[in-house]
Amino acid sequence: MPSRAAAPLYRMARPETLDILHIDSFTALYHRASGITHLLAAPAPEILAALGEAGLTRAALLAKLRADYALEDADEHALGARLDELVATGLVACERVG
């Protein structure tokens, strides 16, 4: 019987590598590892906060965001696109476990 691959685990970059400043509806985030300052708008800061250092699978993250923000129409594909963007910037790490 073939084994199913475990879902990837997404983790926020280590907090000590980030300087975060909330400015009205935006979040300025300086990422020391890359030397780049990112200007984030919703839902990126909320995704980072929900992930934390422990990390979550995409399904667990979607469930947490639905619960924390009363999202009834949250879209898994849209969340996947945002996660891909955050991974590309280095603000989120994606690791395969199992």
Image (spheres, grey):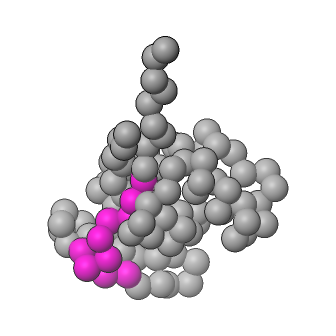
From the viewer's perspective, tell me whether residue 67 is left or right of residue 27: right
Residue 67 x, y percent position in the rendering: 73, 66
Q: Name the quadrant of the C terminus.
A: top left
Q: Position of residue 72 (x, y in %)?
A: 81, 56
* Residue found at x 64% / y 43%: 76
- The residue positioned 72% from the left and 60% from the top of the image is 66
**Residue 81: x, y in percent?**
52, 43
**Residue lying at the far right of the rendered structure:** 72
Q: Is residue 44 visible?
A: no
Residue at 49% across, 84% down: 23
- Using residue 38 as the reference point, say whether residue 26 is left or right of it: right
* Residue 91 shows up from this direction: yes
Q: Count the numbered circles shown.
A: 0
For the point 61% across and 39% down, which residue is it? 77
Say above or below: 12 vs 23. Answer: above
Name the spot of residue 13 as percent of width and height, x first: 32, 65
Q: Let me know if residue 36 is in the magenta part.
A: no
Q: Which residues are magenta?
A: 10-20
Q: Is residue 38 left or right of residue 25?
A: left
The foreground one among 86 and 23 is: 86
Image position of 44 with respect to 80: above or below = below
Residue 13 or residue 37, whichever sits in front: 13
| In the image, residue 15 lies in the stretch drawn in magenta | yes
List the single residue furthest toward the top. 1
Residue 3 falls in image quadrant: top left
Which of the 4 quarters of the picture holds residue 12?
bottom left
